[in-house]
Every structure is written in structure tokens, then in C-alpha cells.
Image (spheres, rainbow, N blue to C red):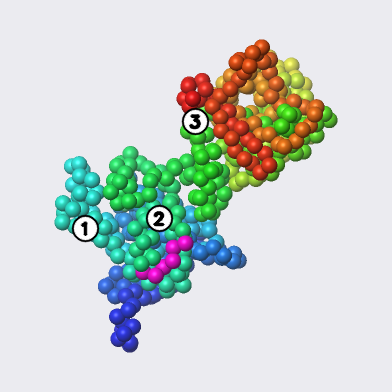
Amino acid sequence: MSLTNASEEAAVTVRRVVTTTLPTRYGTFELIGYQGSDASEHVALVWRHDGVSTVEPPLVRVHSECLTGDALGSHRCDCGDQLDAALQAITSAPSGALIYVRGHEGRGIGLLNKLRAYALQDNGRDTVDANTELGLPVDARDYGQSAEILRDLGINRLRLLSSNPAKQIALESLGITVVGRQQLPVPEHDESSSYLAVKRARMEHDPAPDIHAWELLSRGILPEGASGYGQRDLVERYGPLLEAGDSLVIAQLGQSLDGFIASRTGDACFVTGEEDREHLHRLRALVDAVIVGAGTVTADDCQLTVRSVPGTNPVRVILDPHARVPHASKLLTDPAAPTLWLVSVEADLPARVADHVEVHRMDSADDFRPRRVLDFLRQRGLGRVLVEGGGLTVSRFLRDGALDRLFLTSAPLLVGDGVPGIRFDGDDRLAGALSAPMRRFILGDDICSEFNFSAARTGGIR
Ligand SMILES: [Zn+2]
């Protein structure tokens, strides 16, 4: 290295050497190689989304090298998952960078010392005690060169992707302004959970991220981009629906405060507002199948897709014993999602149906009972189901005790008379009314009440 100016040599310990591009499965980055005065070598992956003006500070991860986690798929630590999640988050943002810091193996003790510490951990030491027993620091990482690289990239203000408050403090002490720090929700493995617990208990790392956030993000339930990590209210609202696993039956109805889902003439456009529609589309993205009665298809010509969110469309299931839905309805003509048309043995069908439509003749009228329909769908791998309408169909599933949860959204409207929402033969006494543990969400002008019937059945919440 030849520096002409002696005073500059004292200040600068890392210099830009080469710039190229790196196409990856996340996108194409500008890749910049840096050489430290201590012979260290680092790279920066720089992301700038073309044509997007960046009002927000860039999203940055300062990633400590970890051969075993990053390249070999180790489950002893979460480095590989963090790297993967960081690159995904950065490429979802308008701009960002990942500084890959070499020489940070094992929090700065080096690769072989890290393996020595692993050997001690095999015999019961935790990650902190193992380093101490080897006579090594618990965390020897220095962020001076990282800060210089950030400055070289013109990044003096950033949003930091890290679970480690000490990393933020270190960068701030080096003159970098951290306007926010976001935790990356990554899966925990059996082998890494005790290691991560020790980092939280003894090294002041953030508490465990809600693992639901990651799955909701990957299913398109959280808004795209890094700001999605801040959507705690959405994680709390939809996370419990992931816990049910492969078997979940939910229903949703939007109605007026006096309990009608449409006017007397069937006008249902729109009882509840935009936020309830987004909520409904998120529910659709969380299930395998969505069920509607023939009356709703006839009245609303619904699409039952997830247009408001980026998730996957569920299979659309029409309960239609007499095959009376119009042949020109969207469910039968629009191939946006597979449609399963459940009809009786004697129903009259058109000569041919579109390729996305599968007709199934149920053996008997009994097979249209809610639990029989759900069993049938479960056998076909459609265990997570949303019963969407209309009022009659949802009420039948409710009466049958087939629902795990009901989302009932009330709009500030009084319709007077019209198409009713929930209706069933009630009890003579109020004590016999249906109730369950519940939560409420404000959706714009509307209020959504969530009844948790599965918790009521198991006595889980009350
Ligand atoms: Zn690691």
C-alpha cells in the first residue's frame, strides 16, 4: 500500500480497492472490495433500487463473518439465517447495504478459537464461559473499519438490522447516526436456542423475535419491505392463526351495527371499509381454502382472491347442491385461483367447465353439513379454511360448532332491514347466549370482534 500523505495514513485504515457487480438470488448488488491497513479484506454489497428516491435512510446490516453459519449451514448459531434475512430485507427496501466484515469470526477470536470454544460448549459450557476459559475476550469485535466503509459509501445515517444493541452503540461512538434498529425475525433451531438464550441473558441481546413475523412476512401478510418488521399489531393479530398448524376453521363477516350484511335488495357494496377488506384478504392469504354459499356467489359475483395483499390465493370452494350459481360468475370463469364446485349427485351441470374448475358431486345431502365438508376438504390437504359467506353459511358453521374463530366486523351503519348476518335459533335465556374469549381491532371506522371458540372449548384463555 502506498499512501503519499503521512497524516492521511494515520487516519485511514481501510480503502476501496475494487468495484464490480454481484447478481444473487436476492437481486443484483454493487459489490465493493476494501483492503484494511492490517491486511484485512472486507466487502460491501450495496443496494439501490432504480428510480426510487430514498427519503428513508438506507437499511444496513454490518455482518460479522461466520464461516460455519454463513457458508456451511450451521445450526449452532443464527448467522446464516440473519444473513439471508438481511439480504432479503435490504433488497425489499429502496436502498441499503450489507457490510460483510472479515476477521469477526467467533465475535473476533478467529475461526479455530471459535471451534475450540464449540468443543468446550459440547461439554456444557455456554458461549460466554467458553471464551473466558480459553483466556479470550467474550466480544473482541472492532467496528472502526466498518464505520470507515460506511462513510466511504456516503452512509452517515442508517437504519440498522441487528438484534445487538452493542453494535448500535459501537457505530454511534464512531460517528454513524443510527436512526432506528430493527430485529430480523429468524427461525430458532433446537441446537441454537440455548446459544441465543445466553446471548440474550448475558450479552444484552434483544428478546426473541416473534417467529410469527417471519412467516407472516413470507406469506405476504405483513407489508412488503423492511418497515414490515415494525408491524407489531399485525403480528399480534394474525400470529395466533399460524399456531393452529394444518387445521384451522375461521369465518369472517362484515355487517352493519344492526347486523345486516347487505340492504333489502342485496346491495353489499360495501358495508365495511377498506381496512376491513385488507383484513379479509389477509385472512384469505392465511388459509388453504375459502368457502362460500351459492347465494353469495349469485348476489355478489365475488372473486375471493387476495388482491389487497401480496399473498397466495386460496382454493375457492362453492357449496352449491343444486348447481345454481351463474355459469358466467367470476369463480367459474376467472382462473385466478382453483375453484372446487361442490354439487349434489342429481344437479344439472353445464356441458363443460373451465380448466380451473373442479366439479365434485357429494354423495348425499348430509355431505353438505359443515363438518362433513370440512372433513372432505381436510382429506384433500385443505385443512385451513375460511368460511366467508354469506350470513346463512357462516351461521350454519357457527351453529355446528365447526368454527375455531369468528371475525365479525361492524360498520357504523344502520341498515334497518336487509340481508341478515349471523342468525341461529337462540336460547330462551341470555345465559345460554354464545360467548367466547374475544379481542377487538379498530379497522378504520369499523370495529372487528374476534371470537375465539377453540379457546372457549378448551378453556384455554378464560
Ligand atoms: Zn455464527
Check residue 244 in the rendering and tell me which mark sits there, or answer none: 3
Q: Does the magenta-highlighted stretch encompass residue 411?
A: no
What secondary structure is found at the residue carrying circle 3? loop
Labelled disc at residue 137? 1
Depth check: 168 or 384 in front? Answer: 168
Image position, residue 314 (x, y; %): 61, 36
Secondary-structure class at tag 2: loop
Q: Position of residue 171 (x, y in %)?
A: 37, 65
The first of marks 2 and 1 along the sequence is: 1
Look at 75% across and 20% down and name the residue there: 322
Marks 3/2: CA–CA distance: 30 Å
Residue type, label 3: Ala
Q: Residues within 10 Å of mark 2 (few under 14, many from 20)?
A: many
**What residue range appears in magenta?**
174-179
Query: Marks 3 and 1, how far apart in space?
Result: 44 Å
Residue carrying label 2: 162
Q: Is residue 177 magenta?
A: yes
On screen, residue 49 above or below 461:
below
> Dot 1: few (<14), some (14–19), or many (≥20) neighbours within 10 Å?
some
Q: Are marks 2 and 1 in contact (CB under 8 Å)?
A: no
Whether the residue under disc 3 has CB within 8 Å of ligand 1: no
Q: Choose top left, top right, bottom left or bottom right for residue 252.
A: top right
Q: In the shown orientation, is residue 331 left or right of residue 118? A: right
For the residues labelled 2 and 1, the Cα–Cα distance comes to 21 Å
- Camera-side residue: 127 or 429? 429
Which residue is painted at 34% across and 58% down in the image?
Answer: 166
Q: Which amino acid does label 2 sit on?
A: Ser
